[in-house]
Image (cartoon, helix red, strand yellow):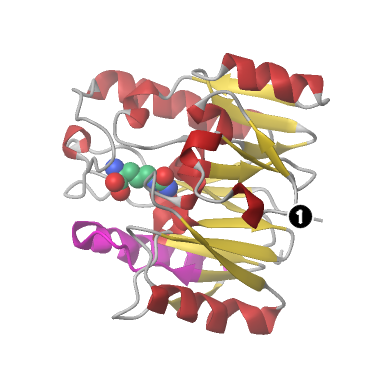
Amino acid sequence: MPSKQALVRRPGPRLAEGLVTHIDRRPVDSALALRQWESYVQVLRDHGWHITEVAPADDCPDAVFVEDTMVMFRNVALLARPGAGERRPEVADARAAVEALGCSVNEIRAPGTLDGGDILKVGDTVYVGRGGRTNAEGVRQLRAAFEPLGARVVAVPVSRVLHLKSAVTALPDGTVIGHPPLVDDPAAFPRFLPVPEESGAHVVLLGGGKLLMAAGAPRSAELFADLGYQPVVVDISEFEKLEGCVTCLSVRLRELYA
Ligand SMILES: NC(=O)NCCC[C@H](N)C(=O)O
């Protein structure tokens, strides 16, 4: 039976200093961000996910975006080497958390760089965004780590947004969803469904046809409801100001061995 274990990391005191690359900086309300994060975690809990909090990294403003610290395939955690040097200290305690859960651990080594947000898994296909944060050597090491385990690694271009999963994610049936102006190459995906809003491209699969998504995409939510899915909406406005989205606030471990 698949596991439902999720890693999260609470926002720290320097959250408002988080990196912004493709958008203008806007002030972040830290108290509101904490409430939004708590609601996000509660939704995971309410849908049967067991939560492990990675130790806080209060010196790292972007640590709340814990997804970027690793990639899971089966029960193997490949630790990232973030493309932004200031985010690299986030990885040590993320390693401790997955080791404690019994995962096998591997890691991206210099000069490779790779952010977890650049990886989208659809079945055994592992799409990796070649963009600002993940370099060719990172892609090569990803292949070397996961292809022997049965993955097929497909590199796709990412130039319009921060990470691959800022542009596209996938529905439970494997259809890749994206907001066309932000997707470099929709033809890279065998089934692609355009969505009308940027944040409508970001879903976390909660299980049982339920999709965790941001409040800022009501028309995309309607589209998914019309396909028989059930959107579960959270407001993550303060994280969106830092180019975060629903996927990056957790790491989902679906194939742990009991
Ligand atoms: N996976 C993600 O989409 N992560 C968002 C990271 C945002 C953070 N401000 C960064 O620039 O690294």
Prevalent SS, magenta region: helix
Q: Position of residue 165 (x, y in %)?
A: 50, 47
Q: Position of residue 153 (x, y in %)?
A: 61, 71
Q: Viewed as shown, does residue 134 lie left or right of 47?
A: left
Which residue appears at 41% of the width and 23% of the height?
36
Asked whether residue 250 is in view, the answer is: no
Which residue appears at 73% of the width and 25% of the height?
224
Q: Which residue is mark 1?
A: 2
Q: Is residue 52 magenta?
A: no
CB at disc 1 and ligand 1 closer than 8 Å? no
Q: Viewed as shown, does residue 139 lie left or right of 15?
A: right
Which residue appears at 68% of the width and 79% of the height?
149
**What secondary structure is found at the residue carrying circle 1?**
loop
Question: Could you say which is closer to the camera, residue 192 or residue 254?
Answer: 192
Question: Could you say which is closer to the camera, residue 191 or residue 222?
Answer: 191
Q: Is residue 144 above or below residue 162?
A: below
Question: Could you say which is closer to the camera, residue 46 or residue 236?
Answer: 236
Magenta residues (range) = 78-102
Q: Position of residue 158 (x, y in %)?
A: 44, 54
Image quarter of residue 138: bottom left
